[in-house]
């Protein structure tokens, strides 16, 4: 099994936020490790709980940060965050109703978030703010 390694490409250069993004990588690695060790039930429980917490404290933190710094595309960014929160709620519901595919989709989406969101969308606000000496 190959765990995800934190890379410079994921780094925004904003310590507090990078720290939180690292948690997402750790969360996925913990999930894969627990599965590999044969603790499927715990793996799923921990993942769902950790992701739910993350979606609240991290996405809300980021939104507040962008707002306070006056990033002009904050509203669009918030919509993308809301989409992840909605997806989480839907997939969790489907999973609890007995559809194992929903969990796989949620894990895959979370994994892709590293590359589609952090490396692209989050980079935009980081670059914008850094160019202006705001971060
Ligand atoms: Fe974001």
Image: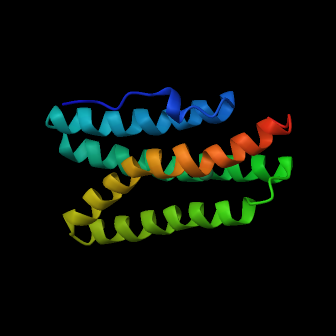
* Residue nearer the viewer, 93 or 135: 135
Does 67 sit left or right of 77 as displayed?
A: right
Residue 29 image point, x, y percent = 33, 34
User: Considering the image in quadrants, where does the C terminus appear?
Assistant: top right
Q: How many marks?
A: 0
Q: Report the residue that reaches farthest toward the front.
A: 131
Residue 126 image point, x, y percent = 70, 41
How does the figure colour the protein chain or chains?
A: rainbow
> Who's the residue at 40% across and 38% down the image?
27
> Who's the residue at 66% across and 29% down the image?
13
> Who's the residue at 73% across and 65% down the image?
75
Does 32 sit left or right of 28 as displayed?
A: left
Does 116 sit left or right of 39 as displayed?
A: right
Residue 61 image point, x, y percent = 69, 47
Placement of 58 over or under 14, stated as above or below: below
Q: Report the residue that reaches farthest toward the left.
A: 38
Does 133 sit left or right of 75 as displayed?
A: right
* Residue nearer the viewer, 93 or 55: 55
> Who's the residue at 35% across and 43% down the image?
46
Residue 81 image point, x, y percent = 58, 60
User: Considering the image in quadrants, where does the N terminus appear?
Assistant: top left
* Residue nearer the viewer, 99 or 112: 112
Placement of 103 over or under 86, stated as above or below: above
């Amino acid at each position: 099994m190959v765990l995800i390694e934190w890379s410079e490409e994921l780094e925004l250069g904003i310590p507090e936020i990078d720290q939180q993004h690292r948690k997402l990588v750790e969360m996925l690695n913990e999930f894969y490790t627990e599965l590999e060790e044969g603790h499927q039930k715990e793996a799923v429980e921990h993942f769902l709980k950790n992701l739910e917490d993350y979606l609240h404290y991290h996405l809300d933190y980021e939104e507040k940060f962008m707002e306070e710094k006056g990033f002009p595309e904050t509203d669009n960014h918030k919509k993308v965050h809301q989409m992840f929160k909605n997806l989480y709620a839907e997939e969790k519901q489907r999973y609890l109703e007995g559809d194992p595919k929903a969990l796989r989709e949620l894990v895959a989406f979370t994994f892709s978030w590293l590359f589609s969101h952090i490396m692209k969308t989050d980079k935009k606000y980081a670059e914008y703010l850094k160019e202006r000496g705001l971060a």
